[in-house]
Image (cartoon, helix red, strand yellow):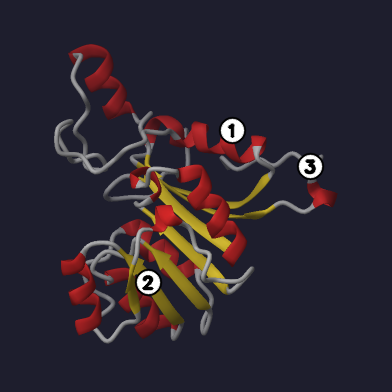
Amino acid sequence: MDGKESLRLDQEAILDIVTPKATVLDLGCGSCELLAALVERKGVKAQGIEIDDDAILQCVALGLNVFHDDIDRGLSEYGDESFDFVILNQTFQQVKKPDEVLKEALRVGRKVIVGFPNFAGWSTRFQLGLRGRTPVTPSLPYEWHDTPNLHFLSILDFVIYCKKNRIRIEQGFYFTPKRRVRFLPNLLADTALFVISKKLPAEAGKRRQIFS
């Protein structure tokens, strides 16, 4: 597979974030388009976890190391800081226990990359507020009866969550399907991508501006 093909803007951003030769664990890696690109273009030592059998077969066909497991069950087989990066992209909103999954990701990874649809984007607000319908958007493309998403959060929700739980937000990226958003992301962005890590005690009182 050519890792340069068919990647979304958020996936390209992840390629820029991950350092060459890093160790990477992708939670909910799907059919491994991103993981394959990371191996090909960044030379990472990659491992994935996926629950869908068909997706795993596609990953194995690409020669990637992917295990069948449910990330809601935890990551007890991995030690603390086993990976340079743990990726939780477009999976965070689908797990049953996002709080526990994120805690485990932060335990086994030095940095965690989290991406999710922004439920507070203008299109979502319009459909819900004026039409009175469950939103269907490019970042939330499913009807209410067949969506895999279990939790609906906004960019602001995640920022507040990190602050309450003393999680350090190192970088934030915001997107529509065609461009990066740099202004009013909670209103204008369809998806968000954050690089987070455990906050050090010495940084507890510092205030950070992440919407610049």
Where on the picture, by quarter, is residue 52?
A: bottom left
What's the residue type where badge 2 is placed? Gly
Which of the marked residues, 3 or 1, is nearer the chain's N terminus? 1
Q: Secondary structure at mark 2?
A: strand
What's the residue type where badge 3 is placed? Lys
Q: Which residue is mark 2?
A: 48
Which of the marked residues, 1 or 2, is nearer the chain's N terminus? 2
Task: For marks 1 and 2, give the one nearer the viewer.
Answer: 2
Q: Secondary structure at mark 1?
A: helix
Nearest the eye: 40 or 89: 89
50 is higher (above) or lower (below) than 127: below
Q: Which residue is mark 1?
A: 160
185 is higher (above) or lower (below) than 195: above
Q: Which residue is mark 3?
A: 206
Quadrant placement of the C terminus: top right
Left or right of residue 102: residue 124: left
Q: Is residue 1 visible?
A: no
CA gap between label 3 and label 1 equals 15 Å
Q: CB of mark 3 within 8 Å of CB of mark 1?
A: no
